[in-house]
Image (spheres, rainbow, N blue to C red):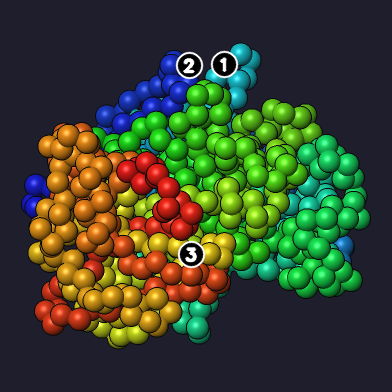
Amino acid sequence: MRIFSFFAIVLAMTASCVGFISCSEDINTSNRYTFTGETIADFILNREERFGSMIKIFRQAEKFGLLSTYGRYTVFVPGDSAIEAYIRKQYEIYDSTKNDPVPTWTGITSPYLEDLSDSMAVVISNSHIVPYKYEMADMKEGVLDTRNYNDRYLSVSFTTVDERFRIMINNQAGITEGDNLVENGVVHLVDAVVSPSTNSLPKVISDYPYFSIMSAALIETGIDEQLQKYVELLKGKEYPYAYESCSGGIYPLSYYAKFTAFLEPNEVFAKYGIYTLDDLKEFAQKWYGTEDVNDPTSPKNALYKFVAYHFLNRELNYNIIVHYNIDHQSYKSERVGSGMVQGLDRKEYYETFLGTMVKAVKPLSSDKAEEAQNIYLNYSHNGCINPQMLNHLNIRVIDLSTFTKMNEAYADFSSGALNGVIHPIDKILIYNEDEMKGNVLNERMRFDVATLLPELTNNGVRYARWQETGGCFHIPDGYCKNIEMYSTTTEWHYYCPYSWGTNYFGDEIIVSGQFDFAYRLPPVPAGTYELRMGYTATWARSITQFYVDGKITGIPVDLRILMDDPRIGWIDDNTTEDDGVENDKIMRSHGYMKAPSSYYATHLNDGTTARGYKGAGRIIITQQHFTGKGHWLRMKKVDEPLDRQFNHDYFELVPKSVLTGPNPEDRY
């Protein structure tokens, strides 16, 4: 639910951020300065004796105008020796491979700064500028959650140099003198150039010898070709590559195809007796069968299935895998998170290249402190039902800082590629239908609507801030492959996370106009499921008819009705003697459920969770059999006023086996 006011808009324009990292008390502040009246451009130009090379690059790229203007920027500035070393190294890489059949293109064909091309000056400059202010205390391990001017995320990791804490950017450039605060942001001095990879994901994987088995499998299956995409045009439409105003929001910045790879290093394979590609083929056949055994490029082939289950069609940096560590700037002056209640597991469910689901969990409810701080794939609190799967569940995703310290050979690892990111894992990742259906996914699965749409993650929509975008994106017809719009008047809007509503993960989706549209539902294991939708009710909502695969699921639903209306029957748990248990049954008999208690009604600002707010709830859309492939949920407006809108926050798919027994998790 959104509440707009002049006061809120003023606060949005003046908001500042405060954040902390676990090691903030160790940050070296001895070189910290504040310069009154000095801009970022002034700071750099006034130190030409140290930054002459970067000054030349910024001038050549015409960036000093930007760095002189009002704003909240973060700029990383390497010294002259770092620039010289970078250019020399990039030239040597190019020069040593220029006669190869496929030379390595670095963009630098001379060891001299004066020969740097204008385009490379822009690339280098943009790599060092982030359009949001990050002091060192704001930097958390993972990535900065605002992209730089090259439209790339910068990774953040922690290390020690000479027994002193240091923050590393892209595992390349260490901050040596941080938090130089100026009028329009902050300058961090670094000891190396922040150099983004210009190679595609398969090339980056092949560059690391400790991923050689998976790299060979990628090539053998042809999946490496699927991972070459970067800028992709959809249905012949070229969408704007700059923010463009439209009615009710802005269009996305780009249309990038990006990917996530979960990869076993060779030493993990070795623990299972796998030392070669042939060994991996034999291992895969034990799990996935021998169909099309002689054609590794067939989607039915065991090696193909094994590799495909390791890749997602979205770029998920470490601290957004479970949408937990991202902070968002609200109209209020404080920095706010996603409004989630602490101490509960954070979960996300993603479709893989195999067309099956993988579950990512941060198990905050674990009584093991170390476990609660990590992220796992296919996590299970309950062990396994297939003993052979014991070593293929609770697979840890290894963060950058940990991985580079595990083995001397890993010290050069940088997780990012031009079109994706690599995450090392500590066990072999396997999809087993019986284990997933009977254990790992045998639970209420909640999907934030944005999770269904990889394009929102890949193009800076899902994790954008209000200040950067105005808070609202308009998504045009055809932009997201998992949305079909059947009406030309359907207007689909994504609202960035904010703190004055009641929304799962803080964000929400509003559809307006005489809408008629559908989502492709996630490919959960085949079975009978209950399908639900979470939303907030207000007078501005519409009357909506739901369909699954073209079939009507019941009578139209009036989404204007608050939950305490007798037709729904919501009663505050605090006013009942059984904490709302009987009231839950009454609401279910009417086709509704209370909202979860896992996130707050943040606009109330009194600790009330969504379950305790009568404006939020869940509607039970249908119970039916799902085959696991290609199901579509359609929503059609059936009332007339065009100012009526459709709000939806998340969907839930709940296996029948969970519905037939006690399910206290449904309260969360």
How many marks the image carries: the answer is 3
Residue 164's disc number: 1
Answer whether labels 1 and 2 touch (C-beta < 8 Å): yes
Quadrant for the C terminus in the image: top left
What is the x, y in percent for residue 125? 51, 50
**10 Å crowding of disc 3: few (<14), some (14-19), many (20+):** some
Helix or strand or loop: what does disc 3 sit on?
A: strand
Helix or strand or loop: what does disc 2 sit on?
A: helix
Quadrant for the N terminus in the image: bottom left
Q: What residue type is labelled 3?
A: Thr
Q: Which of 6 and 357 is in front in this view?
A: 357
Residue plotted at (69% across, 32% down) = 404
Q: What separation in Å lies between label 1 and label 2 (alpha carbons)?
A: 8 Å
**10 Å crowding of disc 1: few (<14), some (14-19), many (20+):** few
Q: Is residue 321 above or below residue 470?
A: above
Residue 528's disc number: 3
Q: What residue type is labelled 2?
A: Asp
What is the x, y in percent for residue 470? 25, 57
Helix or strand or loop: what does disc 1 sit on?
A: strand
Residue 26's disc number: 2
Query: Along the polypeptide, which appears first: circle 1 or circle 2?
Result: 2
Q: What residue type is labelled 1?
A: Arg
Query: Along the polypeptide, which appears first: circle 3 or circle 1?
Result: 1
Query: Along the polypeptide, which appears first: circle 2 or circle 3?
Result: 2
**10 Å crowding of disc 2: few (<14), some (14-19), many (20+):** few
Q: Is residue 302 above or below residue 67?
A: below
